[in-house]
Image (spheres, helix red, strand yellow):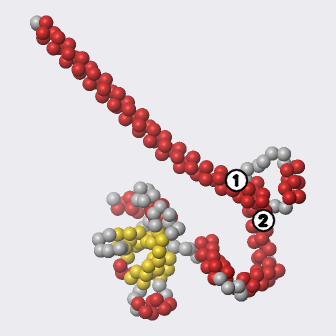
Amino acid sequence: MSGKDLKKRAKNIKRIRLEREKAAFMKLGSKIRAYLFTGILVTAPVAITFYMAYKFIFWVDRLVGQMMPPKLQAYLNDILPFTIPGLGLMILIVALIVVGMFAAGFMGKFFMRLGEWIVYKLPLISSIYSLLKQVFETFLSTKTQAFNKVVLLEYPRKGLWILGLVSSETKGEVKRLLKEEMLNVFIPTTPNPTSGFLIFVPKTDTIELDMTVEEGIKFIISGGLVEPDNPKLKAKK
């Protein structure tokens, strides 16, 4: 083998070694990147949840502290030389329980009716109070459910589909005018499902889904990234 062939062979060996080293570094880089994204995926939801809980607890503590009488604050500072995170939240929960116990009694119901009678006599304030009361009664009542099922419907035109939350069947004047079996469907927005709009849809134009309302809301919040974990849906695949 001539010297020229030896040099050519040595150059090829060096090139192959460099390519292998480059491939190894690229493989290592892709693994590190995958581990980084996995670490973010694991820690971010937990960290954000605890951060929001921390902020909420201290916000309630500060709010309750501002509402407490100065003498009571001084007394608590004397018996508790250090700050207990969540103390204001516990005080608020206990206060709400006491208010609920009082409101459930005879005297509480009397004062509640008296207070509502006074509020309903005030212009503008009565409308706001009535709306807020209906919203809280709807979402906090254990006897009723705000939404009962998730449906698919074509909106805003044929060929485009959207998720909707059914609140109830359409009744009253709207049903009498439309003369058709309709559903009250709330169309939530992404990523904030508390905003949206109400539409009246013919029941025959909707497709009822197996996913629960909670799964549907998660699906909407995530922008379609979090697929509903429904055994029925998995069985169909």
Label 2 amino acid?
A: Ala
Does residue 20 sit above or below 83 in this rendering? above
Of residues 124 and 169, the one drawn nearer to the viewer in this rendering: 124
Does residue 6 sit above or below 214 in this rendering? above
Q: Is residue 10 left or right of residue 115?
A: left
Say which quarter of the image contains residue 220.
Answer: bottom left
Residue at position x 47%, y 82% in the image: 169
> Split into 4 quadrants, where in the image is the C terminus?
bottom left
Does residue 25 sit above or below 212 in this rendering? above
Percent across and percent down for residue 44 are 52, 46
Instruction: Name the residue beneath numbered marker 1.
Output: 58
Q: Is residue 202 left or right of residue 106?
A: left
Percent across and percent down for residue 100 are 75, 71
Percent across and percent down for residue 88 are 75, 57
User: Is mark 2 in CB contact (under 8 Å) with mark 1?
Assistant: no
Q: Is residue 205 left or right of residue 119?
A: left
Instruction: Name the residue beneath numbered marker 2.
Output: 95
The residue at the far left in this view is 2
